[in-house]
Amino acid sequence: MNVTTVMLVSGLILILAGCIELIRTHHMLKIIIGLELAIKAISMFLTLGGWLNGNIALAEAFVVTVIVLEVVVATVLSGIAISIYHKHGNMDIRNLRNLKG
Amino acid sequence: MTVLQWIPHLFLALPMLALIVNNVIPRARIRTTTIAMSATVAGAQMLLALAGVFLLVESGESAVRFGMIWDAGKNVGYFQTDLVSMFLLMCVGMVALASALTALTTIDDHRGSYTNLLMVMMLGLNGMLLVRDLFSLYVFLEVTGLASFVMIGMYKSTRDLEGAFKYLALSALATIFILTGLSFLFIKAGSLAFDALTPALFSGAGDGSTLLCWAALVLLISGYSIKSGVAPFHSWLPDAYESADTAVSIMLSGIVTKIAGVYSLLTLTRLFDGIAPLKTVLALLGMFTILVGALLALAQKNFKRIAAYSSVSQMGYILLGFAAGTNLGILAGLLYLFSHSAAKSAFFTNAAALEKQLGTLNIDEMGGLQKRMPITSGSSVVALLSTAGVPPFAGFWSKLMVLLALWSAGLKGYAAFALIASILTGAYFLRLQKKVFFGKPNPRWDAVVEITGGIRVSEILLTIVTVAVGLVFPLLLLYLQRAGLI
Amino acid sequence: MNIAIYVCLGCMLVFGVFSAASRKLIISAVALAVVSAALGVLMYVLGAHTAAIFEVSVCSGLVTVIFISAVSLSNGDKQIEAQDVAVPARKRRFLPAILIGAGAILMIVAWLTGFSVGTPAAAVSGANFNDVFWETCQADIFGQMVALIAGASAIVVFFKESENE
């Protein structure tokens, strides 16, 4: 049982956890948690790829870019969630359909 | 530097300049002209890219490489544009122009922000077409997704936010799939540049990394399919298009799903050229999409939802063209993309006109509007005939080319299926036309007049493009053959 | 080095599943921060020093702060408890059970088939994060700039008062 295999399997478990949470949740902010969890696993895969191919620097460049993008996405999602909360009073997605006024 | 070498810089520089100008000038002064400025940028991009296509064909080079912030030192170039990218840049310009012209009338809140977001979206789309690296493709894809999500949520024509959130959740899922696929490819290949990814990745040593590459391919196809609204991942599309403002729907349907989804799938097929299962999967997805989209469009009552399901269906034709795998197939797919962009943008512009003048989009309530709104009715008929594949419009030629490409690549069954499915396309559109524009006039609409302003200009422009391209298509084919591309 | 990797992986898994399955938002956020810290240590052990710094300072710090401010600005924590009252306790244990099951199956399959992705190669000489990032990844730099502009425009759009109101 190689250490890389263990890393791959644990990363896949984390991605699965993130995806399930993303799909099943009804709360706006928990979508961000699910997305962030999956991105952590993906950063680990990218570093693993760099380590295996001897090209750590390129993997680091990818990881830094992914981190910046995901921070922007998380901030925008939080902003949207807060703005919806101010207008409608709660963060449940199920209440968003067919809102009038 | 020759003209050809500085044109590509403008595709990234002009929207950036517009962004700076829009944010530096005080809000009060720019409020009336800001959307006109974005329309100018879009129009300029369309004309520059058109010039660029001809210049590139004449010069005989296969691609132009350049750098944006500083020039390439040790490398040959950071961005590159080849013929496919130039052509698609022109499509981006055309659809953005239609969207900005429509927005002149339909958007009167947060106009400065609309320009900001439109320019950011154009930067994202242009960036996707100009990169040389699968990872950079993802970066600009994420930017485009962010801008489109904000535009859907911000400019809502109904109060319904459910569409925006469905799009958000599925878009996040697509991001996860794409990034996981990219990281698996990176584990085997060691680099994600286009030059480094070859079909040889999928054969070779029998250890686990080859299996990872196959898994990566599945994940990448799923992720890009979600982004392009291909069935069975299309469920976010109708809700998102319906709840967004029509100017935003024009951008989404006309170009974002195409570049973010279908162009990425095209890049995959061009990179991994010899992998047979890839083409088969794409062809099957294409067939399934055509069927699902057309069948679901038959049952809808809302103008925009019919247009949305129709977009889903037509995406399948583009996929079939790319799945043929030959040069003719790629050309056919691109031309179908162009004619569908023009026709669907015209269609959504008509939806904007109807919404503005009538206040409703339920086709059961409309009727006999042809006398009252002749320009809208005319442009809608042209768009319908072009999409259904009736000569002499652009859609007929591009559909013919897709069928020819499929036939010559040996996928005869798919070609026959595509031909038969066109009948379904004609069916749902005829139903729409009959209910909205022809038929008995509904007395409720006796006082309605034709739309004026930006929407009218956009309708006329897109109709002219569809008709003109359809008429000069044979000349275009001769030109391409002379240039050695067919 | 392998021991360090296994410890980090274990932390990531435990706190990650905890974060996904937890009902309270603040606990999820803190667990996510611990996952980021563990990932940062893992990256450092594998040799990616700059990425480790980024991960720990940005994800473990900045994103957690943003998230907790979003929660406090909206009192969102109370909402989650209110709506989860209807969900029976049985259903809440589903997620860890599914994940542990999937993990066990994957491990067994990998062990039986002898799955392996190869051994780590020696580092390419002269490759430094600075050189690679600034010399070859200009498109990514441009993309990050555009993403930041997009984020700023988005926040402005959502929080500006409507001009017509």
Image: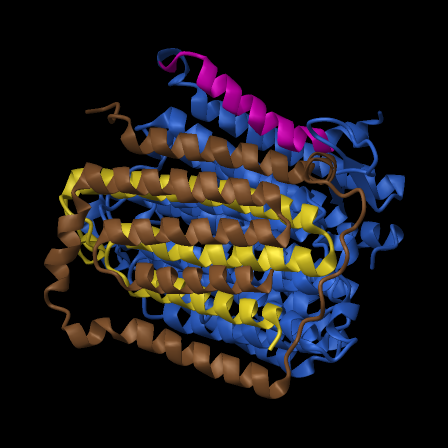
Chain colours: A yellow, B blue, C brown
Please provide percent x and percent y for residue C77: 17, 49
Residue B309 sits inside the magenta stretch = no
Please provide percent x and percent y for residue C98: 35, 77
**Residue B419 sits in quarter:** bottom right
What range is drawn magenta here? B8-27
Please provide percent x and percent y for residue C8: 48, 59
Q: Residue placed at 80% from the left, 42% from the top? A: C126
Which of B99 and B376 lies nearest the eye of the viewer? B99
Please provide percent x and percent y for residue B226: 48, 62
As drawn, the residue found furthest toward the bottom would be C112
Can you say whether B383 is above or below B404 in the image?
A: above
Which of B314 and B349 lies nearest the eye of the viewer? B314
Which of C75 and B460 lies nearest the eye of the viewer? C75
Q: Residue placed at 68% from the left, 44% from the top? A: B131
Q: Residue placed at 53% from the left, 40% from the top? A: C53
- Dominant secondary structure (helix, strand or loop) of the stretch shown in magenta: helix
Give the side of residue A40 with respect to residue B4, left or right. Answer: left
Q: Can the viewer see residue B207?
A: yes
